[in-house]
Image (tube, grey):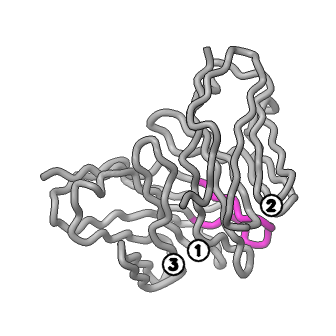
Amino acid sequence: LAKTTQPISMDSYEGQEVNITCSHNNIATNDYITWYQQFPSQGPRFIIQGYKTKVTNEVASLFIPADRKSSTLSLPRVSLSDTAVYYCLVGDNPNQAGTALIFGKGTTLSVSS
Amino acid sequence: DAMVIQNPRYQVTQFGKPVTLSCSQTLNHNVMYWYQQKSSQAPKLLFHYYDKDFNNEADTPDNFQSRRPNTSFCFLDIRSPGLGDAAMYLCATSRDGTGGRATEAFFGQGTRLTVV
């Protein structure tokens, strides 16, 4: 199981771009990288998933270097409502039916005005 | 429309009294998960189902059991709740894709369990 390491917390201001980096040095060849967002008293919400290079959707971008040992979630122009905990997940053994989604400690992002 | 529904949202149970939490889904996903989340901690996976195949995490206490009678429903049974079992319990679903890769997981709103 690939272990992930993220900063415990980050602070930002409204309108800034925020980049959260996740380390996953022992990522397996078939593992995908997935990011979730969680607000207090709610279940996590899927943000983005990728395997290599760059993935972009309406919410965020995900940058993955060639060695795939890390990934960076980029949130453009954050607002106060982006204050949340962000989790980086790396897929469990893909040959086992039913991928176990294991959450690491996550990064608490605080956005101020 | 809610796709993963957990009932109840809040549950109070007595120390040692069995309690069951329920989860239903309208997504027809083949994988269902149960997580325990305590204050200021990450969700901790208790177990998950791939269809009817049950996968228990190694450190999940025997006090926690689960049932999945059909695709849509999944239950978490806590046989003898202790004070340390007070937490938010989250249910999630996903559809495993090619090579076993989990696609987007959808979470319910959670059930907050209080043990008195």
> Which element is circle 1 on?
loop
Quarter residue A12 falls in: bottom left
Q: Is residue B83 above or below residue A95?
A: above
Q: How many angstroms separate mark 2 from mark 3 (CA)? A: 28 Å
Q: Mark 1, residues whose alpha carbon is within 10 Å: few (<14), some, or many (≥20)? A: many
Residue type beneath disc 1: Tyr
Q: Mark 3, residues whose alpha carbon is within 10 Å: few (<14), some, or many (≥20)? A: some
Marks 1 and 3 on same chain = yes
Q: Chain letter for mark 3, please.
A: A
Q: Which residue is mark 1?
A: A32
Which residue occupies 26% across, 49% down? A110
Which sits in the foreground, B42 or B80? Answer: B80
Which sits in the foreground, A96 or B77? Answer: B77
Which residue occupies 58% across, 74% down? A32
The residue segment tinted magenta is A90-102
Q: Quadrant of the C terminus of chain B?
A: top right
Q: Which residue is mark 3?
A: A50
Mark closer to the chain start, 1 or 3 = 1
Q: Which residue is mark 2?
A: B71
Q: Chain letter for mark 2, please.
A: B
Q: How many angstroms separate mark 1 from mark 2 (CA)? A: 25 Å
